[in-house]
Amino acid sequence: MKFIKLWLPVFIWCYLIFYLSDIPGLDTGLGIYDLLLRKAAHIVEYFILTLLLYRAFRKSFFLSFTAIIFWSSFLSLLYAVSDEFHQSFIPNRDGNFGDVLIDAIGILLVVFIYLKKGERP
């Protein structure tokens, strides 16, 4: 039960990212604000994914802080790459390496926060 409680949110969040990426030509119609909103969404999506992975790894396995941060960040980045690849098959969407870099901002924010709050390798 503990495993489900820790890992189900990770899988649900990954599904939500996949679902949003599967929408053809996702656009809010807000012009330049649409672009800013979508880029901010990238940061938030991967910030949350990295937090969920960090929590799941920390409470599921006896790993060092460095290993937990590495695996949380690596898997989030891997999912970001796979998400952009997925989008390359969706009408009116494209896979964009720049979006992976924006996703990485959300991932790095988690690393920075945990380092700043005093968790150390």
Image: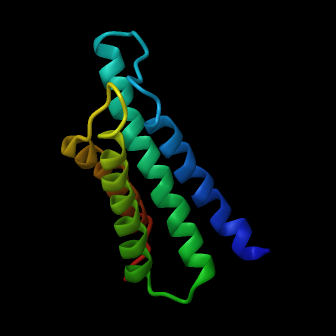
| Residue lying at 20% horizontally and 46% vertically, measured from the top left | 97
- The quarter of the image holding the N terminus is bottom right
| Residue lying at 30% horizontally and 54% vertically, measured from the top left | 81
Q: Is residue 120 left or right of residue 100?
A: right
Return the x and y of residue 18 as percentages of the image width and height. 49, 45
Q: Is residue 8 left or right of residue 110?
A: right
| Residue lying at 36% horizontally and 56% vertically, measured from the top left | 107
Instruction: Establish if 69 lies above or below 112.
Output: below
- The quarter of the image holding the C terminus is bottom left
Instruction: Name the residue nearer the viewer: 25 or 73.
Output: 25
Instruction: Name the residue nearer the viewer: 21 or 58.
Output: 21
Q: How many marks?
A: 0
Does the image show residue 46? yes
Residue lying furthest bottom in this view?
A: 62
Does the image show residue 112? no
Instruction: Establish if 14 lies above or below 30.
Output: below
Instruction: Establish if 120 lies above or below 79.
Output: below
Return the x and y of residue 21 as percentages of the image width and height. 43, 38
Return the x and y of residue 65 as percentages of the image width and height. 43, 81
Instruction: Establish if 59 lies above or below 99.
Output: below
| Residue lying at 33% horizontally and 59% vertically, measured from the top left | 77
Residue 38 sits in quarter: top left
Q: Is residue 65 left or right of residue 95?
A: right
Instruction: Name the residue nearer the viewer: 55 or 4.
Output: 4
